């Protein structure tokens, strides 16, 4: 079994420096960090504190019950299994205040690295700590954390809105989970604003609700009577299904009276009648890509980079021409 002394010798540094890098308990230059990590990977060395146990990575997601994150998580686990890594999972429940504690809990097991989906990387306290190699998943990269795997949420918002406009809709409502809990939702709304402006249309203020529960009890009575939209864009497919249920309770048909579109492309959207019109996000491939990128950074000292994965518009039956 490789020793820390061997890692230090191969990296061309002192034993203390190698220890600081691998245990993340002191300063070291970026060049030295990469040298030590590469040496450790080449020698098959794993940090102390986990004798006899396989290495692990930590994953933070907003919700384990959301099919989007479940799909990404499954792909991460499959990729890590091949690489001989276990996976530790934490969830924030869409609460920015819980993210730092969740990440701290993951760090207790000294993971090889982290894959994080936070509410907003520009404000997340979880990203203020000194972290091992970290990849943001579904969040745009930051100066401190340049490694990220994303889809173009703003572009997706623009595309689905432009599609509705092309179908004759001019009065389009955007219904979303709280923007403070999801920068993805905020970017999708910004794409909506882009498309409305490009077509000389007046946008509506987004209606924001909690991401946690209540979709089956959604009440759109006031919004439908005051705003009179001909189409509603929901910031995710689960919310879109809640919108369809709420419209039916109002005695309205989809798409006969109101068209509905969503984001994510979850399987249940294809099972309803008519199938949901949505932007299909590549959640499974994004998870696998994030896992591969993290392993490359942590074990091969590869540079951090931003990878963008393509989405597709899936035309269902919940949007009609007017």
Image (spheres, rainbow, N blue to C red):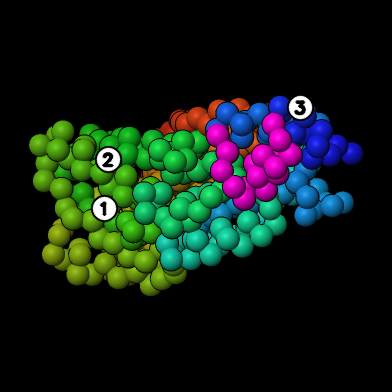
Q: Residues within 10 Å of mark 1 (few under 14, many from 20)?
A: many
**Mark 1 or 2 closer to N-term?**
1
- Sort mark 3 into few (<14), some (14-19) or many (20+) by Cα contacts within 10 Å: some
Front residue of this view, candidates 250 and 208: 208
Q: Is residue 78 visible?
A: no
Mark 2, Cα crowd under 10 Å, few <14 / some 14-19 / many 20+, is many
Q: Name the residue beneath numbered marker 3.
A: 10
Residue drawn at (46%, 53%) of the image: 128
Helix, strand or loop status at disc 1: strand
Question: Viewer-nearest of labels 3 and 1?
Answer: 3
Judging by the rendered image, the residue that carries numbered circle 1 is: 174
Viewer-nearest of discs 1 and 2: 2
Q: Nearer the viewer, residue 294 or 5?
A: 5
Mark 3 or mark 2: name the one nearer the start of the chain: 3
Residue at the outermost right position: 1
Marks 3 and 2: CB-CB under 8 Å? no
Mark 3 vs mark 1: which is more N-terminal? 3
Q: Residue 298: in sight, yes or no?
A: yes
Q: Is residue 77 left or right of residue 180?
A: right
Q: Which residue is mark 2?
A: 191
Q: Is residue 16 magenta?
A: yes
Magenta stretch in the rendered image: 13-29
Nearer-the-camera pick, 226 or 252: 226
* Image coords of residue 131 (percent x, y): 56, 48
Say which of marks 3 and 2 sits in front. Answer: 3
């Amino acid at each position: 079994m490789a020793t820390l002394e061997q890692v230090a010798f191969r990296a061309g540094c002192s034993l203390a420096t190698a220890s600081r890098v691998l245990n993340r308990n002191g300063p070291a230059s970026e060049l030295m960090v990469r040298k030590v990590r590469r040496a450790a990977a080449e020698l098959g060395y794993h940090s102390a504190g986990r004798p006899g146990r396989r290495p692990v990575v930590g994953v933070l997601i907003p919700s384990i019950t959301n099919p989007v994150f479940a799909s990404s998580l499954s792909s991460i686990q499959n990729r890590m299994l091949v690489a001989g890594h276990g996976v530790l999972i934490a969830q924030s429940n869409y609460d920015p205040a819980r993210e730092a504690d969740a990440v701290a809990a993951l760090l207790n097991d000294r993971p090889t690295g982290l894959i994080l989906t936070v509410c907003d990387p520009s404000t997340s306290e979880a990203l203020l700590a000194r972290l091992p190699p970290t990849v943001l998943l579904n969040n745009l990269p930051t100066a401190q954390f340049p490694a990220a795997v994303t889809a173009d949420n703003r572009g997706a918002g623009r595309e689905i809105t432009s599609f509705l406009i092309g179908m004759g809709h001019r009065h389009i409502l955007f219904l979303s989970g709280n923007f403070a809990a999801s920068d993805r939702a905020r970017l999708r709304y910004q794409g909506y604003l882009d498309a409305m402006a490009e077509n000389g249309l007046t946008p509506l203020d987004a209606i924001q609700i909690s991401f946690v529960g209540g979709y089956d009890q959604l009440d759109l009575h006031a919004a439908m009577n005051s705003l009179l939209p001909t189409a509603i864009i929901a910031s995710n497919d689960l919310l879109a299904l809640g919108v369809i249920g709420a419209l039916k309770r109002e005695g309205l048909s989809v798409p006969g009276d109101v068209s509905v579109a969503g984001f994510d492309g979850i399987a249940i959207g294809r099972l309803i009648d008519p199938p949901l019109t949505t932007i299909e996000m590549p959640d499974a491939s994004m998870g696998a890509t994030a896992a591969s990128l993290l392993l490359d950074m942590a074990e091969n000292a590869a540079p951090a980079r931003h990878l963008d994965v393509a989405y597709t518009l899936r035309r269902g039956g919940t949007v009609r021409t007017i």
